Image (spheres, rainbow, N blue to C red):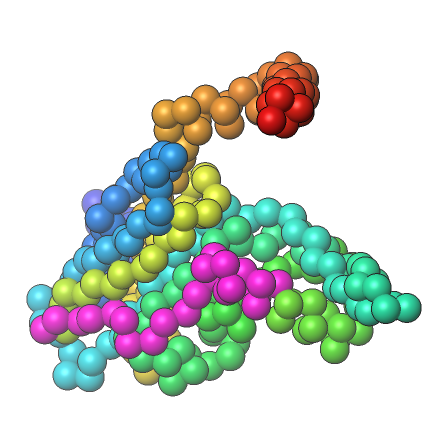
Amino acid sequence: MVRLGALGLVAMAAPLLMAQDKPRLVPDVSQRDVEIRYSFTGAELLLFGAIIYPGGRAPEKRADIVVVLKGPTESVIVREKQKIAGIWMNADSARFRSAPSYYAVAASRPIKALVDERTAAIYELGLDNLQLSPASARPTDEQRRFTAGLVDLNKRVGLYGEVVGEVEITDDVLYRARLRIPARVPVGTFTAETFLIQDGKVLAAAVRPIEIRKSGFERFIADAAERWSFVYGLVAVALSLALGWAAGALFRRM
């Protein structure tokens, strides 16, 4: 009976002992709560942390770090404009079920030099490997065109980005990276994911949440629009009519 109990304890402890043979990540961010006010012009987040190796010794071959910052996913419709009879109009569209509202990745080296395409797709490392979940079946060429259009549009406004060589690793243990958040960033719960990569494999991963929310008068307006949408709509229409009447009266006097 004692021998069976000892064997049971060894079996239960085996996963813990195996986990100690793998490196661990201890990540953190400079701001876990970002407030958006009327004067908000963007922010720069510092993502940093430490790599804890078994036995406290770093391997002879240096590992790499990839940091991914994602915003809440949302359903997006991408419309394609074409010139028809001399007029630009929406000719076709495609809907994606789960496109990240914000996506930025920083890596110590080019992602293609770190992992193969399959691994990059599994962990969504890089803009070329985003899993956007198209809502309808389309020919491959068309789907690629709409996907490229969505990514390009978000890159122009600063909501999507990819930087290489921006992750600094000190003494093979400490790392840090800086990612820019634009002024028009959406609100919600963001995730900062850190990946430790060596020999084409992800050795460790860790996640930290970041809250981005509106505060002050902006938060009041957002809450009012969400909680009392009907009253908010009436007030917005009434305010528009009042401003229009006041502007008309002012111009008549002039």
Residue 62: image location, x then y, percent? 20, 80
| Residue positioned most to the right | 85
Seen from the viewer's position, the closer of residues 93 and 85 is 85
The tally of labels here is 0
Residue 96: image location, x then y, percent? 68, 56
One can see residue 211 in this view: no
Q: Residue shown at 41%/48% (left/top)?
A: 183
Q: Is 167 in the magenta?
A: yes
Seen from the viewer's position, the closer of residues 69 and 214 is 214
Where residue 213 sits, quadrant-wise, is top left
Q: Is residue 198 above or below residue 133?
A: below
Seen from the viewer's position, the closer of residues 34 and 234 is 234
Instruction: Say whether residue 245 is left or right of residue 222.
Output: right
Residue 226: image location, x then y, percent? 58, 24
Q: Is residue 105 above or below residue 198?
A: above
| Residue positioned most to the top | 231
Where residue 27 sits, quadrant-wise, is bottom left
Instruction: Say whether residue 58 is left or right of residue 195.
Output: left
Q: Is residue 125 above or below residue 216?
A: below
Instruction: Say whether residue 198 is left or right of residue 251.
Output: left
Q: Residue shown at 61%/52% (left/top)?
A: 98
One can see residue 225 in this view: yes
Residue 53: image location, x then y, percent? 16, 67
Q: Is 110 in the magenta?
A: no
Q: Residue shown at 50%/69% (left/top)?
A: 127
Quadrant containing the N terminus is top left
| Highlighted range, magenta | 150-171
